Amino acid sequence: VRTDYPDIYQRLLERVKPERDQNNRKALRDNWWVYGESRNTFRPALENIERMSATSLTAKHRIFADVPANTIADSTTVMFAFSDSAHLGVLSSRLHICWALAAGGTLENRPRYNKNVCFETFPFPQLDEQQCQQLGELATQIDAHRKRQQAQHKKLTLTNIYNVLEKLRRDQPLSSKEQETNHQGLVS
C-alpha cells in the first residue's frame, strides 16, 4: 500500500496508527494496519462451504439468515459455519429462539445472543435424513422469501417484518404503516 497507494498509506498512518499505538492488545498494536484480527478458528471452518448462517449480536427479534461464506462481518454479527439449511432451520426454530432469549443477556432492552450460553449449551436435536431435508427446505423457503421481498421493496426491513408478524400472532390491529409492511413483506 505504501508503494502503490501512498495517499491511502499516509491516511492510515495518521489516523489509524496513533489509536492502535495506545491499544492494550499487542496484536492490534504490532499489526496496526490490519483491520481487526484474524479468526484462526473460524475462517478455516468456512474453506469448503459456500454459505453460512448469521444473526445480529443484539436485536429485538432473533433472526437467522443464510449468507455467503466469504461475508466479512463486524463484531456485532454472530456467524455459524453450517452450510446446510437444516441447521438454519434449527437455529430459526421457536425452541432455539426461546432458548436464546432465556439464556442470553440484554443490552438495554434488546436481547443479545451470547454464543457461549445460547449456542454451545443448546441441545441440538438428532435429525434423520428426511427430517434434515424437510427442515432445510422450510428454512430455505423462509430465507428466500424474506430476501425476495426485501429486494422488491428497498425500505422493507427484517425488524419491521418481524414486528408485524409478532402483532399478527397476537391478533393485534396493524397501523397503516404496518399494513403496508404486511403487504410488501407478504408477512401473513
Image (cartoon, helix red, strand yellow):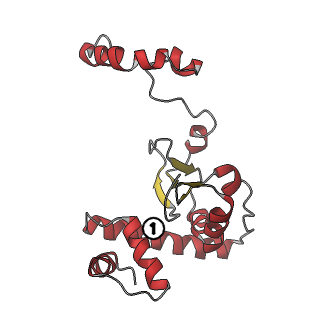
Taking depth in this image into account, of 6 and 86 the one nearest to the observer is 6
Tell me the quarter of the image containing the N terminus. top left
Q: Residue at x 49, y 58 (%)?
A: 59
Residue 36 in picture, x, y percent from top left: 49, 30
Residue 184 in picture, x, y percent from top left: 29, 76
Q: Would residue 145 be seen by someone viewing this image from the given angle?
A: no
Q: Residue at x 58, y 18 (%)?
A: 26
Q: Which residue is mark 1?
A: 143
Q: Would residue 166 be seen by someone viewing this image from the given angle?
A: yes
Q: Residue at x 56, y 64 (%)?
A: 85
Taking depth in this image into account, of 115 and 150 the one nearest to the observer is 115
Q: Amino acid at mark 1?
A: Asp
Taking depth in this image into account, of 13 and 110 the one nearest to the observer is 110
Residue 84 in picture, x, y percent from top left: 58, 60
Residue 157 in picture, x, y percent from top left: 35, 64
Relative to 96, 149 lies left or right: left
